[in-house]
Amino acid sequence: MSMSLDGFIAGPNAGPGNGLGDGGQRLHDWALIPSGSDRIEVVATGVNGAVFAEVTSTGAVVAGRGTFEPAGGWGGDHHDGVPIFILYRSQPGIDISRWPLVTAVNDITTAISQAKDAAGEQNVLVHGAGITRLALAAEVLDELELHIIPVLLGQGRRLFDGLAPGHIDLQRTRILEGEGGVTHMHYRVRY
Amino acid sequence: MSMSLDGFIAGPNAGPGNGLGDGGQRLHDWALIPSGSDRIEVVATGVNGAVFAEVTSTGAVVAGRGTFEPAGGWGGDHHDGVPIFILYRSQPGIDISRWPLVTAVNDITTAISQAKDAAGEQNVLVHGAGITRLALAAEVLDELELHIIPVLLGQGRRLFDGLAPGHIDLQRTRILEGEGGVTHMHYRVRY
């Protein structure tokens, strides 16, 4: 997840047609920039490129409806044809029957478990803020990789919001200083 | 400021007698631990010690009432007899007339300006979340040094909260991996 230093993963007024919120593209400029209609260009090189490559070397994707649907379901293929598990309480709001890689699952523990099985030796990409919170609460999120962007947005959508009061210890496993002032922070979660 | 990875500088239920909130001491264990009645012991060594030494090598302190009063005004001397500037809208809620180092000021720009003059070649310590926000809004905060603690508190008092929507660019100037998984992140603010 790309996050401003003050904790936001999207700017204010996020919604249809403004998925990243006002100014939210700034959080992704290190890796992905819009390039023409519906196209996105990968611009990460160097340290940033190496970290970004980890995202696309995952063997399965787990996402929530709030990430999957605005992205048009990634056309049914997030990257390289890996399986995608979408968490739904009820029916998907978008027809997934045409996408053989996409499976709807109705609880987070099952979604992560099936994704791990599908990914084999590779990591699972857990994609989105809502799903991250659910996975933390269910104690099935193993690692956090945050790309800290050198900007204060002031307002917007937070990554960490609405977690139960508590004390989840983390183990810092890697800090990388990326280009453009982006700092990649990796932690293991210790429940 | 010491901050959990999820953005909190104090746990929930902070108040008189529980200044750091539930579990909030965890954020300060890298540097300061309570040691008997009203005493605090400095425990930072190594990288953490070097960073902590920067705090006490500042030449003036600026703080708000919410930091100054619960701390008992640091007995009138935060460290090494440097001048202390306290921001008050009205009267201090504590008698400062007995403390020659302490000056009450009623706007943030003046407070920072006087503190910089007093500090000379040394840095000014801006102490507390409320005052940090005010100084950012007034564009008089030059630098941020965050000590990122490897823990998720879930709830509590945030450092970055209630800022206006906007886009304050930062320049990453130093990342240090401290002991105990604490990461010291230093930025210059670019208004």
Image (cartoon, coloured by chain):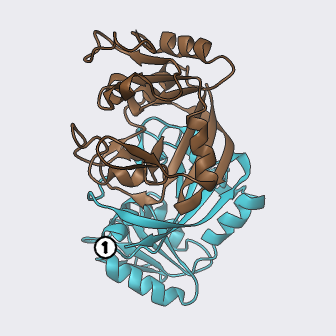
Chain colours: A cyan, B brown
Amino acid marked by disc 1: Ala
The answer to whether A30 is drawn above or below residue B160 in the figure is below
Q: Quadrant of residue A147?
A: bottom right
User: For the point 42% across and 30% down, which residue is it?
Assistant: B163
The image quadrant where one finds the C terminus of chain A is bottom left
The answer to whether A69 is drawn above or below residue B35 in the figure is below
User: Element under label 1?
Assistant: loop
User: For the point 44% across and 24% down, which residue is it?
Assistant: B77
User: For the point 28% across and 40% down, which residue is it?
Assistant: B19
User: For the point 61% across and 12% down, which residue is it?
Assistant: B117
Viewer-proximal residue among A52 and A144: A144
- The answer to whether residue A93 is left or right of residue A149 is left
Measuring from the top left, give residue B25's x and y in whole percent: 35, 51
- The answer to whether residue A58 is left or right of residue B6 is right
Chain of the residue under label 1: A
- The answer to whether residue B173 is left or right of residue B25 is right
Report the residue that reaches farthest toward the right: A46
Q: Residues within 10 Å of mark 1 (few under 14, many from 20)?
A: few
The residue under label 1 is A138
Measuring from the top left, give residue B146's x and y in whole percent: 53, 43
Viewer-proximal residue among A135 and A38: A135
Measuring from the top left, give residue B139's x and y in whole percent: 55, 20
Measuring from the top left, give residue A171's x and y in whole percent: 50, 68
